[in-house]
Image (cartoon, grey):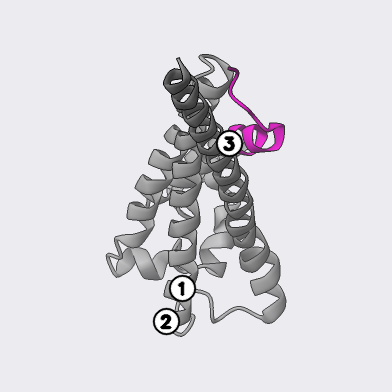
């Protein structure tokens, strides 16, 4: 039986992979990737973002905050799982694909929620200095996408997994009844 795939899930996993690797590269290459660093030209848009979100900026780096690099490491693992889902779903047609995609989306959602909740509990220590407009445009909307899309993927792949388990259970029951009648 072919693995059920969803174009929008596959596109999200595929299109976000280079973005995530680029973002992780910025965090893991600090201070060289930061404004004034010799590799900053690769991450030029981060000149603004490091001012919007201090987790990405000088304050976190100078404080030795390990969260940016730790979350980048997790981003890489999640993206490798996303790519594994694409391979399993579209190349090998493995029934394990939805489990891998579901697990990856749960990881992304959990880590992103942690990122947001951390801001709440530290009284918006990394983003509270922004104007409301800057906060919405440069932090809430882009980061909100990383809550919304993984949530939708978890919902979709969770439904697919539940449907598959229900079909397997029904098939098992029918097979047992047929065997008993013989």
Q: Residue furthest bottom?
A: 123
Residue at mark 1 to residue at mark 2: CA–CA distance: 6 Å
State the quadrant of the C terminus.
Answer: top left
Please tell me in which quadrant of the rendered image residue 166 appears: top right
Check whether the beta carbons of the residues at disc 1 and disc 2 lie within 8 A of each other: yes
Question: Which of these two is toward me, 112 or 161?
Answer: 161
* Local SS, label 3: helix
Say which of 23 and 1 sits in front.
Answer: 1
Tag 1 residue:
117
Image height of 31 relative to 100, above or below: below
Verify whether residue 164 appears in magenta.
no
Point out residue 18 in the picture as x, y percentages from the top left corner.
55, 35
Q: Is residue 76 above or below residue 110?
A: above
- Write the residue at 49% across / 34% down: 169
Q: Please give the name of the residue rendered at 44% of the width and 43% of the height, measured from the top-left corner.
A: 103
**Separation of residues labelled 2 and 3 (CA atoms):** 30 Å
Left or right: where 132 falls relative to 116: right
Circle 2 sits in a helix, a strand or a loop, which is it?
helix
Which quarter of the figure has residue 38?
top left
Percent position of residue 71, x then y: 38, 54
Q: Which residue shows up at 56% across the image and 57% down it?
A: 47
Quarter of the image with the N terminus is top right
Image-based side of 167 in relation to 64, left or right: right
Residue at the far front: name it.
Answer: 181
Range of residues picked out in magenta = 1-14
Q: Under tag 1, what secondary structure?
A: helix
Query: Where residue 140 appears, x then y in whole percent?
Result: 63, 68
Provide the residue designation for mark 2: 121
Q: Report how far apart the C-alphas of labels 3 and 1 lie in the structure.
A: 24 Å
What residue would you read off at disc 3? 13
The verdict on residue 10 being magenta is yes
């Amino acid at each position: 039986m072919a693995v059920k795939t969803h174009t929008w899930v596959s596109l999200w996993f595929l299109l976000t992979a280079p973005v995530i690797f680029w973002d992780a590269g910025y965090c893991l290459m600090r201070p060289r990737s930061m404004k004034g660093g010799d590799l900053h030209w690769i991450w030029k848009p981060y000149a603004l973002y490091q001012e919007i979100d201090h987790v990405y900026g000088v304050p976190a780096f100078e404080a030795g905050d390990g969260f940016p690099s730790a979350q980048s490491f997790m981003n890489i693992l999640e993206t490798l799982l996303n790519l594994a889902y694409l391979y399993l779903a579209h190349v090998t047609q493995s029934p394990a694909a939805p489990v891998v995609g579901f697990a990856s989306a749960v990881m992304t959602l959990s880590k992103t929620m942690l990122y947001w909740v951390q801001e709440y509990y530290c009284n918006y220590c990394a983003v509270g200095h922004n104007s409301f407009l800057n906060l919405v445009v440069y932090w809430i909307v882009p980061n909100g996408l990383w809550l919304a899309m993984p949530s939708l993927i978890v919902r979709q792949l969770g439904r697919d997994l539940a449907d598959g388990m229900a079909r397997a259970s029904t098939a098992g029951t029918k097979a047992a009844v047929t065997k008993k009648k013989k």
